[in-house]
Image (tube, rainbow, N blue to C red):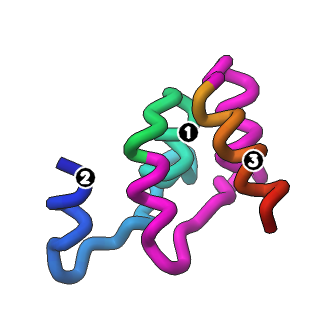
Amino acid sequence: MVKELLTVKGIDVNAKNEDGYTAFLLASCEDHIEVVKELLKVEGINDKANDGNTALIGAARNDGISCKEFLLNLKNQR
């Protein structure tokens, strides 16, 4: 479903909720690894919430093992 939504013209993947979290940040916090991988394919994805939390911080705080490991490996590759 995420792949389909990403093809919608004009979709704002960096839209934030009232707490300043984007879909990418929320997916990371909830350990939805496949959603995280799809959203990372989008150029300019926002990795920081209004409070300064990042996807990696959110995954680590919420025991998102898959996302935490994936994001750490990604960070180490850059």
In the image, farthest residue toward the top: 63
- Is 22 left, or right, of 70 in this rendering? left
Amino acid type of the residue that numbered disc 1 sits on in the rendered structure: Ser
Image: magenta residue range: 36-65
> Can the viewer see residue 17?
no
Return the residue nearer the eye: 36 or 54.
36
* Image mark for residue 28: 1
Q: Residue 65 at x, y = what percent?
A: 65, 23
Residue 51 part of the magenta-drawn span: yes
- Report the amino acid beneath label 2: Val
* Label 3 crowd (10 A; few <14 / some 14-19 / many >=20): few
Judged from the image, the secondary structure of the residue bearing numbered disc 1 is helix
Circle 1 residues within 10 Å: few <14, some 14–19, many ≥20: many
Q: Is residue 37 above or below residue 6?
A: above
Return the disc, 2 or 3, that comes first in the chain's sequence. 2
Give how far apart the Cα atoms at labels 1 and 3 are: 14 Å
Q: What residue sits right under mark 3 in the picture? A: 73
Residue at 53%, 69% (x, y): give it. Answer: 45
Of badges 2 and 3, the one in the foreground is 3
Q: Is residue 34 magenta?
A: no
Instruction: Indicate the quadrant containing the C terminus: top left, top right, bottom left or bottom right.
Output: bottom right
Local secondary structure at mark 3? helix
At horizontal 38% and vertical 66% (from top left) the residue drawn is: 13
